[in-house]
Amino acid sequence: MPPPPPLTTTLPSLCRHVDLLFDPLGLLFDLRRRLIQASTWGPLALLACFTYRHQNSSNAEIKSVLDTLLGAVSKGVLSPAMKTVMGDIAGLVLLREVLKYALATQRCLLNAYTNTNGQVKWGKVIQRTVLTYVMALGKKLPVVSGIIEKEVAGEVSKMEKDLDHEFSELKAKSNLELLDKMPESGIPAKEISDMMDRVAVIEDKMWESGRCSGAVYHGERDHLKLLNKAYAAFSLTNPLHPDIWPSSMKFEAEVVKWVANMMRGDDDGVCGALTSGGTESIILAAKSHRDKFREEYNITQPEIIACTSAHAAIDKACDLMGIKLVKVPMNKDTYEIDMNAVSRALTADTIMIYSSAPNFPNGIIDPIKELSEMAVARGVGLHVDCCLGGFILPFAKKLNIPGVNIPDFDFGLPGVTSMSVDTHKYGYASKGTSVVLYRDSKLRKYQYFAYPDWTGGLYVTPTIAGSRPGALTAACWASLATLGQQGFMERTREIIECRMRLQKEVEKIDGLFILGNPQAMILCFGSNDFPVLNVGDLMSKKGWSLNSLQHPDSIHLCCTVRTCGPEVEADFITDLKACVAQAAARALEAPEEGGNAAIYGMASGMPSGPVKELMYTYTDAKLKA
């Protein structure tokens, strides 16, 4: 039998071969997961690739070769034909992996440096790529690494001084006396109480004005009094000791059940737990999927697919859990996750797709119905980050507000395996509570930690923390119970109609445009005429606290109960128009030093290493007394 014909080595033909193999290999990877045993994967891959290699041969030749190959496989003998095929497979798989990572890197760079019209900022792509490569190479050279460290240290030192001054001014605004050591004899209780009351009055003025994006989502005094009373009544409770405080079980179980019901999981065994916030909920969802797929499918190099707009909590989760995070771009027109990119990113090691409803930057809801179908077809998990929208979307869907279309996003979709819902945002509970939900208790058990051999006794916890503040659980229950479904419906209508009114006015401002088609509470706008982050800095000087965003540069306002009202809305539009006019007038002038515009501008042109060092410095400065 003549040797198999070699693959064409020209680039176009090679690309076609790789492209044709992409889907079959993807199916085999998926089959490998289902069959699990590696002994099955080898022959299947060999046979599939051998058949592809000899697709132009006659049927008799193929049958003869396949019979020989099957015989060699069963006997464990490597025939010349088998060696040839194995060499081709190794080369093709290696080439596929190289191309996959090269494409992933390219997508990441292009998405990070694409403006709102989909035009690539090639200058920044090249600058960032070259700088990152040079920085990584330089750190390995003793002489160069010393120079780099010296330059970074200089910038860090300068930033430390600036931050010390800035934070000292902020603390001075609250009229706080800084104490370097714990008092020797203790401060009288009344003095402490008076000081805290005085500081609270000063700091409450900012969020009470309604000029904050997010941060405080409710803030009505009667509601706060109830939360504070619940906290005070249960300030000593700890869910770790249900025998002492059985009420903590009631409060947590009912909160989880109520939220599951909101997410259409009441009759399907949907369950969950109360956590310290959205980040912990997301970390636990990632851990549960990691451990499930490790135990059931022997996946030891797990991957999670997420959009570049996904909350950074999933980056933190993957960093902590040793999971590879595969980032895919947004659709440049809708700002939803790119479905084609998700499909290409799926492999046998994929354990979960991460989606947002809505995402934090732009307030856009991902196409979760389509993601659900994909997750079911490929046998992977689907997490819905509903931290921001959990207490808005279910009620908005029931309200049927004209002009608002809330798509399916919850456990009513068969592919959704977990969700995170923050009760301390639009659930209007005290800060420090969130709910993580799972399709069933089998998946939830993977988030638990159990250690039966501890000398201190049998130890098991449902979440990351051991001791937990039962007072926050009680306050959370009180918030949901007092408002009820009707209360949430009323506030949801107010917030969404507020966002719609503001959006209508922002769309009339020359030089600004809305990113995507928001349906919930976030209004995000950008500009192609001037640096829009300058507008954010100017708005800060007028007493507004908005969110500055990057990739692309934009600003968003997260509407809350505090934002709703004719006076706040009118002030926002008036101030925004003035700041836009000022920013447009300065567009051709040299940029001013300082502010978010300068910070983000500097960061976009630097490698990630030095930027992280500056971020660490900022965090160190905040933690100083």
Image: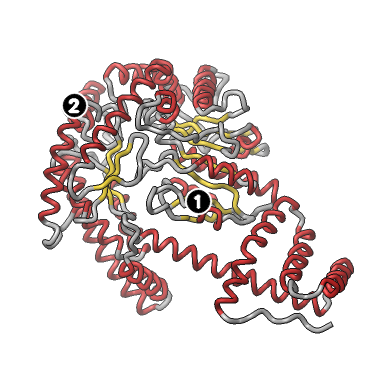
Q: Position of residue 290 (x, y in %)?
A: 60, 47
Q: Nearer the viewer, residue 263 or 282?
A: 263
Q: Position of residue 542 (x, y in %)?
A: 13, 40
Marks 1 and 2 sit apart, C-alpha to C-alpha, by 40 Å
Residue 238 appears left or right of 587: right
Instruction: Name the amino acid type tagged 1.
Output: Met
* Residue for badge 1: 339
Q: Nearer the viewer, mark 1 or mark 2?
A: 1
Residue 457 appears in view: no
Q: Residue at x 46, y 35 (%)?
A: 407
- Locate residue 215: give its quadrant: top left
Q: Nearer the viewer, residue 394 or 463?
A: 394
Instruction: Name the amino acid type tagged 2.
Output: Pro
- Quarter of the N terminus within the rendering: bottom right
* Residue for badge 2: 566
- Locate residue 392: give its quadrant: top left
